[in-house]
Image (tube, rainbow, N blue to C red):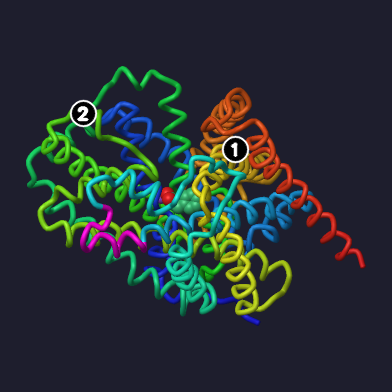
Amino acid sequence: MKREQWGSRTGFILAAVGSAVGLGNIWRFPYMAYENGGGAFFIPYLFAMLTAGIPFMILEFTLGHKYRSGAPKTLRALNNKFEWLGWFQVMISAIIAFYYVVVIAWAISYVYFAFNQTWGQDSNAFFFGEFLALGDDSTPSNLGNLQWHLLLPLCLAWAATYFATYRGVKGGIEKVNKVLMPLLFAMVLLLIGRIVFLPGALDGINWLLEPDFSKIWDLKVWSAAYGQIFFTLSVGFAIMLSYASYLPEKSDINNNAFMTVLMNCGFSILAGIMIFGALGYMANVQDKALTDVVSSGVGLAFVTLPTAINLLPAPGVMGPLFFLALMFAGISSHISIAEAVTTGLMDKLGWSRPKTATVFCSVGLLVSMTFITQGGLLLLDLVDYFINNIALLGSCLLELLLVGWLCRLQDFRAHANRISEFTIGGWWAICIRFVSIGMLVVILFNNIMTAFKENYGGYSNNEVTFIGWGMLTLMLVLAIVINLSSKQENKI
Ligand code: PHE
Ligand code: NA
């Protein structure tokens, strides 16, 4: 049977941008830029984008296009001792899919709450207490009652992903992204258009952009920039590779990669302006310093911004708009994470798409219910820490080592150049073999040491060992077992 294909080039790019633009662009990038030198952060950030982001994106598009299969099969084709890495990547995606969806479920609830600011005056107590029912005795392993009110939004979020992955590349994923992406950009522009005229908003944006050049001599800032680039572009864990495996024969790889990366990073800057504009306004109204109101992650989206929304003119319009944007950014990323698993399983096990999507999404729904219990947030937090800081970067590093040092890298460059309008030079190989790998080694080593030295988030020793390190070990063992059994199968 002929492999499915994207219906159009725009469709592919929108889907790739949909994957890249996610919660991370909205709640991670702005804070990271602010913390690491503001305007001066753009120097390491753009440097990381050029030397790691774009080369890695070109590589993943090339691998997908050349081998036309998901991560396990592609990595096996590169080197038959490395199929396990493909499965490891598929597992990273599967685990992210299980908890990322929960945040989308929160966003769905908050779209509804935002119409009349159900969160009231104390958005902190509302989020952790009323909404998530986090108890005093909750820990990542002490999970209590299922929060039934989260089940419907959770099912809705999985339904969107199920629809897209079931219908397939052209009839599902592409269709959804063609609607969501233009809407997302339009909504963010609309929000910015209103926010910048509020008193204090420009001060907030200035705070974000004001360069502190002393920071650019700090290695930490550089590793933050590189870490953010790998994370934000969804490269190195089966996602972009799977999307690219559905590219038609004639595709402009280099150009597509540039556009995807630039749109993602452009969106991050827009999100930064939106968030810091809102924070600046809030600081102004509450007569506080900006440093007292900035935050990132879950707290920014579900605690700080709801308070800011209370203070906005027309909160019943701006609020839903913001949470819809968060939801759209999340859904389009979640679809790509689920598709990485679906493609990997389909190509390796020979299952049909409907069967694979049905199995994965139903198992996924069940597993993700663990995260909507009392204490589910803490489990999510701990799992996310280990996946992002160690598994994901480790997988990026191993993939680059394999491709850069155990394969003929120049063949991939030749492949990309043959079908692309503009060609890439020798700098590409240098970026992959030295710059990206070197930075990854530094960051990963540092992350592993930190994770060893201190118990993340003050969670207990046992929890960090069993849930964090245990999960990583289990993933590795499982990946190797699958690899070994698939080898036997081939011998028969
Ligand atoms: N790249 C997207 C983001 O910035 C989504 C994503 C990140 C998906 C990490 C999976 C893991 O949010
Ligand atoms: Na991103």
How far from the left and from the top, in percent, is residue 294? 28, 35
- Amino acid of disc 2: Glu
Q: Give the quadrant of the N terminus.
A: bottom right
Stretch in magenta: 108-119
Identify the residue position indicated by label 1 in the image.
390
Residue 113 visible within the image = yes
Residue mark closest to the camera, 2 vs 1: 1
Q: Quadrant of residue 189?
A: bottom left
Q: Is mark 1 within 8 Å of ligand 1?
A: no
- Amino acid of disc 1: Ile
Q: Quadrant of residue 114?
A: bottom left
| Residue 449 versus residue 150 in the image, above or below | above
- Most extreme residue toward the bottom, as rendered? 1
- Along the line of sight, the residue nearer the viewer: 318 or 415: 318
Q: Earlier in the sequence, mark 2 or mark 1?
A: 2
Circle number at residue 456: none
- Specify whether residue 269 is painted magenta: no
Identify the residue position indicated by label 2 in the image.
210
Label 2 close to label 1 by CB (< 8 Å): no
Q: Determine whether, in the image, residue 177 is placed left or right of residue 437.
A: left
Secondary structure type for disc 1 = helix
Q: Residue at x 21, y 40 (%)?
A: 279
* Classed neighbour count for the residue bearing mark 2: other residues with Cα under 10 Å, few (<14), some (14–19), many (≥20): some
- Specify whether residue 117 is painted magenta: yes
